[in-house]
Image: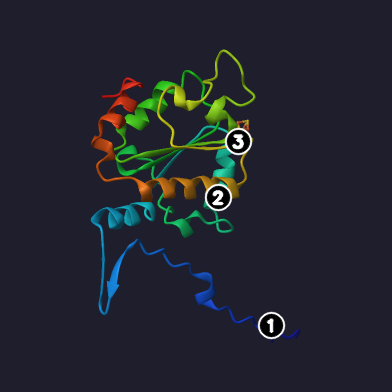
Amino acid sequence: MRPVRFNVHPKQADIKDNIALVEMPDGTTGEGYFATSFESVVGLARKNSMWPLPFATSCCGIEFMATMASHYDLARFGSERVGFSPRQCDLLMVMGTIAKKMAPVLRQVYLQMAEPRWVIAVGACASSGGIFDTYSVLQGIDQVIPVDVYVPGCPPRPEAIIDGVLRIQDLIHAEGLRRRNSDHYKALLGTYGIQ
Ligand code: SF4
């Protein structure tokens, strides 16, 4: 019988080298304590526990699938819990061509999300209509909802999508707790007819 061969020189993975620790916010530290602002703690928690809602209509959605799969593994950034209930998600990821008929649906999904919520336009179609400069295609989702980050590409590679998520994390971390109640933010929503 043919013997079973094992790898006689197994590579010893050093797990410590592969785990990135969350960056500590600014604060004061001493023996046995660390003090920081409430805002920093909330920002830290929010940015590392986003729940994405993928709104995928065409080819860019396939890149998103690759981004979620084991090789790129968006779970490394705390975003593995993909949901399809807008009320339980805080990151709307729009991927693909959005027809004008689809625009009210996209807007409805956005309205159903609770604050604070963020939006990424993934790829040329979601950002600007892409190559579909036609009567039936929305020329960018920012015509109907506010967008926080645009990811270029047709389609963008998973690395680019991850970069977009990292940019969103930067925004979340830096966002003040009261921003959503500010006049500036209300005025921004007002330009979209959202109360
Ligand atoms: S940007 Fe390109 S790859 Fe993405 S949905 Fe549009 S046509 Fe497809």
Q: Secondary structure at mark 2?
A: helix
* Residue at the image point whose x is 31% and y is 36% from the top: 113
Residue type marked 2 = Thr
64 versus 16 height, above or below: above
Give the numbered dot on residue 67: 2
* Residue at the image point whose x is 55% and y is 32% from the top: 96
The Cα–Cα distance between marks 1 and 3, rounded to whole angstroms, is 40 Å
The answer to whether the residues at label 1 and label 3 have Cβ atoms under 8 Å apart is: no
The Cα–Cα distance between marks 2 and 3, rounded to whole angstroms, is 13 Å
Give the numbered dot on residue 59: 3
The Cα–Cα distance between marks 2 and 1, rounded to whole angstroms, is 30 Å
Q: Secondary structure at mark 1?
A: loop
Q: Which image quarter has ligand 1?
A: top right
Question: Nearest the camera: 135 or 139?
Answer: 139
24 versus 54 height, above or below: below
Rendered-image quadrant of the C terminus: top left
x and y percent of residue 64 in the render? 54, 44
Mark 1 vs ligand 1: CB under 8 Å?
Answer: no
78 versus 149 height, above or below: below
x and y percent of residue 124 in the render? 59, 31
Mark 3 vs ligand 1: CB under 8 Å?
Answer: yes
Q: Nearer the viewer, mark 1 or mark 3?
A: 3
Residue with the most extreme right position: 2
Q: Earlier in the sequence, mark 2 or mark 3?
A: 3
Asked whether, in this view, residue 156 is left or right of residue 107, the answer is right
Label 1 sits on residue: 7
Q: Earlier in the sequence, mark 2 or mark 1?
A: 1
x and y percent of residue 33 in the render? 25, 74
Residue 175 quadrant: top left
Q: Give the crowd class for mark 1: few <14, some 14-19, many >=20 residues within 10 Å.
A: few
Residue type marked 3 = Cys
